Image (cartoon, rainbow, N blue to C red):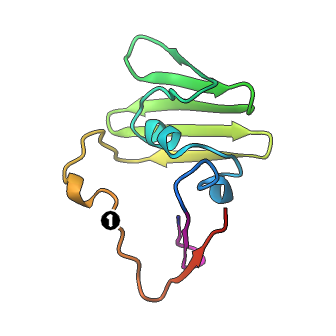
Amino acid sequence: MLDLSSKRLYRAKNGKKLFSRALSVELEPSSVFNILFDEPIQDKGWSCGFKKSEAPTSCENKKQNIKVVWSERVNDKKTVDITHPNGEVQILFTSFSNEVKNPQKVFNLKVPKSFKTYKLRE
């Protein structure tokens, strides 16, 4: 996770705790991928609602008390709200495409030298 405000990079193994520092909730990386790419969350315990489109309008995990709502989809813009008793995150995408243009560079991140790197314990 890259924290631009404090110029820090947090490294950790993939797992549900990876995003807990930023989101205050434990989400599997596959769930985050599905949220970003307008796919229903298919991990255990999740159920999703749909309207006319193929993309989900909301997904919920009642056991973990997490709800994800996609709203205000207009062209490439969308808003995603992730709510949990520990906090709420709202992500506004001003331009977003589900199409990956250069798959070789998808997960390559060049971290500026001025950033400090921290390895998170499991």
Q: Residue reaching furthest bottom?
A: 114
Picture layout, residue 13 above or below residue 111: above
Residue at 42%, 29% in the rendered image: 39
Is residue 3 one of those drawn in magenta?
yes
Q: In the image, is residue 101 above or below residue 115? A: above
Magenta segment boundaries in residue numbering: 2-12
Q: Residue at x 59, y 77 (%)?
A: 118
Dot 1 amino acid type: Asn
Quarter of the image that includes the C terminus: bottom right
Quarter-of-image position of residue 120? bottom right
Is 66 or 45 nearer to us in this picture?
45
- Check disc 1 and report the residue beneath it: 108
Name the residue: 52% across, 54% down.
14
Drawn side of residue 87 relative to residue 110, left or right: right
Q: Is residue 47 left or right of residue 77?
A: right
The number of callouts visible is: 1
Query: Few, some or many C-alpha atoms within 10 Å of disc 1 (few <14, some 14-19, many ≥20)?
Result: few
The x and y percentages for residue 96 are: 34, 44
| Residue 57 position within the rendered picture, expressed as x and y whole percent measured from the top left | 51, 22
Q: Residue furthest right?
A: 85
Residue 42 higher or lower than 106, as above or below: above
Q: Write the residue at 60% across / 54% down.
A: 19
What x and y, as percent, mark residue 89?
Answer: 64, 47
- Percent position (x, y) of residue 119? 59, 74
Task: Judge whether 105 appears above or below 89 on screen.
Answer: below
Residue 23, magenta (yes or no) = no
Q: Secondary structure at mark 1?
A: loop
